[in-house]
Amino acid sequence: MIEIAGVWKEFAKGERRVLALQDIDLQVAPQEFAAILGPSGCGKSTLLNMVAGFDHPTRGTVRAGGEAILEPSPKRAVVFQEPALFPWYSVMENVVFGPKTQGQPAAEYRARAAQIIEQVGLKGFEASYPAELSGGMRQRVGIARVLIMQPEILLMDEPFGSLDAQTRSLMQELLLQVWERHHQTVLFVTHDIEEALLLADRVCVMTARPGRIKKSIQVRIPRPRAIEVTTSPEFNDLRREVLALIREESQRAATEAA
């Protein structure tokens, strides 16, 4: 579903050229949930932006469904850290905005919106406005607004990063439930090791800048999953392995900076 081959990315910084990504090769299978994890500044979001079509590689190719990614597409929906809702629209109006602007029949998208709003735990809040909602509830609206478009690929850039620990845990469980229903291909960027291992089928650990894929780790914990798996011996073994990889890269980056 997603094919990243030989990707390099450079940015201009004044008169200098900064190499953000180097020789990235990554394939994500249809319906796979893949997480990208790595030290700060390693290029995780840059890589996701190229899959979204917001940016392009300096060298190499990025494809989805066998086609080169040249621009954003509703087939590849993005959930950001902040949901960026329309404050003057209600929950229902925010959720149906996409299909409405595409000219889809109201009877069809209204019924689908009601179902998705219930799935994300917002039944009864259809007429509420974003200012009346908590941060977690606003992010649920953002996810619902993406799901109603029925994308083939879901791209998530630290979607729970601004939430408190308890709300973040609830949102992780919600995403697990939503994924079990819809089984979209997911590429998920996070700094949180436990979050990546809880959610993903595979965790791709990146090196410090320039970012490369250091190791790809299969998470063979059975689905469906719940938060309780984070206390299992298998989960703790994976956490130690990933933590060691991240620590090694963080220390290398600190040494080179010094």
Image: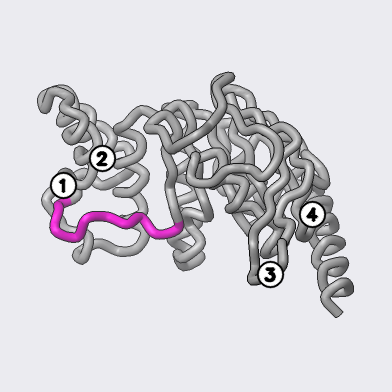
Alpha carbon distance from label 3 to label 1: 51 Å
- Circles 2 and 1: CB atoms closer than 8 Å: yes
Residue at horizontal 48 percent and vertical 31 percent from the top: 153
Q: Which label belongs to residue 126?
A: 1
Alpha carbon distance from label 3 to label 2: 49 Å
Name the side, left or right, on which 97 lies relative to 242: left
The tag earlier along the polypeptide, 1 or 4, is 1
- Residue 151 belongs to magenta span: no
Q: Which residue is mark 4?
A: 207
The magenta stretch spans which residues? Answer: 81-90
* Residue 220 makes an appearance in the image: no
State the quadrant of the N terminus. Answer: top right
Where residue 221 appears, x then y in whole percent?
69, 35
Alpha carbon distance from label 2 to label 4: 38 Å
Which tag is nearer the camera, tag 3 or tag 1? Answer: 3
Q: Which label belongs to residue 229?
A: none
Which tag is nearer the camera, tag 3 or tag 2? Answer: 3
Q: Which label belongs to residue 15?
A: 3
The tag earlier along the polypeptide, 2 or 1, is 2
